[in-house]
Amino acid sequence: MRSHNSSTGEPAPRRPGMAPWVVASAIVAADAFLCVKTPQDLDRLLINVMLALSAFATLHARLLSLASAGFAAIGAYASAILAVKLGLPVGLSIPAAALACGVLAVVIGVPVLKLNDVYLAICTLGFGEIVRVAIILLPGLTGGSTGANLSTGFAYEAMRKTNSWELGLALAALCYLFWATSRAKAGRAIRAIRENPDAAATMGIDVVAYKNLAFTASAMIAGLAGAFYAHSVGSLDAGDFKFSRAVDILSYAVLGGSGAWFGPILGAGLLTALPIVLRDLLSFLKDFSQLPNILNGAALMLAIIFMPGGLAALFGRSPLGGPRAARRASSAGAVTKGAGGIEDAEPSGPGGAGGPILEVLGLSRSFGGVDALSDVSFAVGRGSVLGLIGPNGAGKTTLINTVSGIFPPTAGKIRWEGREIQGRRPNRIARSGVARSYQNIQLFGEMSVLENVVVGHHTRIEARLPEAWLRLPSERRAEREAREEAFSLLERLGLAALAGQEASRLSYGDQRRVEIARALALRPRLLLLDEPAAGMNEVETAALGDFILELKRRGYTILVVEHHMDLIMKICDEIVVLNFGKKIAQGKPEEVSRDPAVLEAYLGSE
Amino acid sequence: MDFSLFADPTFLAQNLVDGLSRGALYGVYAIGFTLIFGVLDILNLAHAATFMWCAFAGYLAMAGLGLPLPLGLAAAMVAGAAVALLLEFAAFRPLRREGADKLSAMISSIGASLILVSVAEAIFGTETRRFPSSALDPRPHLVGGLRISSAQILILVASVALMAGVGLFIRKSRMGKAIRAVAASQRAARLLGIDVNGVIVVTFLAAGALAGAAGILVALLTNNIVPGMGSQIELRGLAVVILGGMGNIEGAVIGGFVLGLVETFTIAYVPGGSDIKDAIAFLILFFILLVKPNGIMGRGVADRA
């Protein structure tokens, strides 16, 4: 039973209470104490925070990159060389250095981000090392192993050019950008990728592009931090950015938490102040030079084992798309009511009325020698409901995965609205009007129900990131409309009361309906439903059947995989039966149910 | 490249010997590394720190306690097994219990590595330690015009023995079969009644012992023992396992010899080669990842070893 009744779904309260604020205040107090005592530590603190944000940018997108220290080194040396050797003002050399890091990250990211996470970690580890070696091998430019100091032509007066307030201003601007991004389409897309990259892709999100964005942003921020470091310290050493520095940066971000942008600020704040405070309090640590490293290493391990969400998680779930947003969307919806939640399917797309909208031609897919699908062909008429049935392991989900682009077919064609789409990436297929639900539920579990559905609007929100940064009215309107539309979809599916809930806490049947709502938010012309009634009781299943028929009336084409034969018989215009990857029957429901081959497949398998 | 040097067969043979002994070390180090990846599917980035601690253990046993070389080797291998066991219980098992992802395990091992290296620096300082000359005769043997050090002979003999031993262990022994089963699927292995955690412990012990052997052999070859010595081999180890295919034991052996020979020949035949030798591992790593991410021999303890 549901434990919530109010109209916007108050969540079972999980108030974080005072604890996080006490922790945050303690960190701020310790850092303030540190900076009052030794003012030059302020720059160090701000640079550490900036580097932590750089690591966060990648970790938040589930990329384990150890490249931040390397990019910081490039930023530091680039800005130093531009400022000292070419005489550029730091107001130009610092942004130029950050930009150079960004360009380099784009170039490196294209091949590297296609690899899986382990290889990314290895590559970025190697990258940091190669940067260090390159700095040492170019003594004419960088000062080599001697470092960039007076003896190598980098005079302190020419280097030491920035003040703490400039650094603070840059950091504040950065924090604003993180905040604004987290509230915009891009932030939501990255959270979706973080939770479930496959599902994000089938919502039309270009996963590779967003990973590149995160990697590039991380590199630019690291470069910025490095450049400020060069002009704050006034000299550089090739060892300033060695591997252990990359680990420090990672530990700030992991301790702070990779879920919310303010996490790394807390993490860097704590780990910068902690060794100094400990040394002041405990005299026997006075000369223990390895203390910061040991604390950083311990913070990494303890946080990842005992507190995977980091310090930021103490503050509870981010309020984006939570109960408050749901309430706002619901009250706005009450005014603009009338659409009833479901829009008619868009008639666009060539192919002409009446003809097939989707054709599967000789489709095969094998996994390591096992043929999950072999030579399957059928067509789905525009505006019809096609049922795909068959015993377990018949290849039904494989077919849906192939059509939605999760993996390419081994052979055969998929013609969608007259165009061949086999082998296209899932986000492109989603964008062209194909949406799906999953047999094993693939919601973004830590997001609210409402936000899950808003992710489905991804391809339709046109506002770009700079518009979100400037908080232009057009961008805010697009976001508000997406939320309101998402809410009315939820209303139509009887989920309005749950809009503000964390999706993973819903019942099985409710989660399936959220998946359908999320798929409908794409305004697809073809809906692929993989066992939508699994886990639903009879009443819910019957309601789902009515709902699918309503979608059909509104012009949607639907391909549904189901085991509930009552439902299939009620809603389908045509049925395709698969067994061991082969099509064994196709026809009207009543024909198929009498087909001896079908009866044998079902009875034989039981 | 200086081609006239190829005309000198003694020089060529000398470099072959140097390259093979260097490569043997990389191989021994990388087998332990790739074994853990093959079985657990996680990258143990604390393997280099384990290696460094073993070098110190061997050094302390031989220089401090005056033990003979075989016992020094044994001490290093025992120390490696102990450190690896510590890692399994402190850094990996708690995460496995919570079903955390591979990223978390990698992060945890990075933290463990930082702690291990920092503690070593706190205890041993940063100055270089060297074996007393009584530990191993530093004078090279002259064999048909080639200069071969005792350390090189020891390395070649010990490495080949260890590689063959690991190969036989994984292929033939009961535990080796269990390790392969766990590598293929932990769930299936559990259903077959295999004590998965026990197998993982054995895997860590073996990987740690191999890191230990590599640690003391490298220490004997370079006679240069510092807490930072792990970073020298870390990237090379990664390049070797990627070259040979992640989790592939024969691949690690072959990859080790390839890298050792390429490095040695670059130094010998390419002008300025010694400056870029540190970059070679990275270049190989990057190139393989771009061209053939599964390595030259494919991946997997389960299906190949």
Image (spheres, coloured by chain):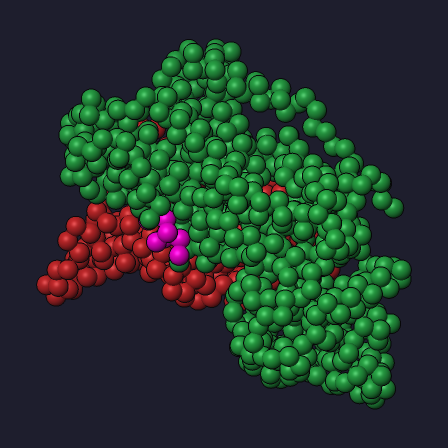
Chain colours: A green, B red
**Image position of B172 with respect to B264: above or below:** below
The x and y percentages for residue A593 are 84, 83
Residue positioned most to the left: B4
The answer to which quarter of the image holds residue A363 is bottom right
The answer to which quarter of the image holds residue A26 is top right
The x and y percentages for residue B8 are 13, 63
- Residue at image coords 42%, 11%: A37
Q: Main secondary structure of the magenta part?
A: helix
- Residue at image coords 29%, 39%: A97
The x and y percentages for residue B230 are 39, 41
Number of numbered labels in the structure image: 0
Name the quadrant of the N terminus of chain B: bottom left
Residue positioned most to the bottom: A596
Residues A410 and B4: in front is: A410
Highlighted magenta segment, given as a residue range? A104-110
Q: Is residue A241 left or right of residue A516?
A: left
**Image position of A155 with respect to A213: above or below:** above
**Image position of A343 with respect to A90: above or below:** below
Q: Is residue A386 left or right of residue A79?
A: right
Q: Is residue A108 magenta?
A: yes
**Image position of B32 with respect to A76: above or below:** below
Residues A257 and A16: in front is: A16
- Residue at image coords 74%, 80%: A576
Q: Is residue B244 magenta?
A: no
Residues A440 and B31: in front is: A440
The x and y percentages for residue A207 are 51, 55
Residues B194 and A361: in front is: A361
The answer to which quarter of the image holds residue A598 is bottom right
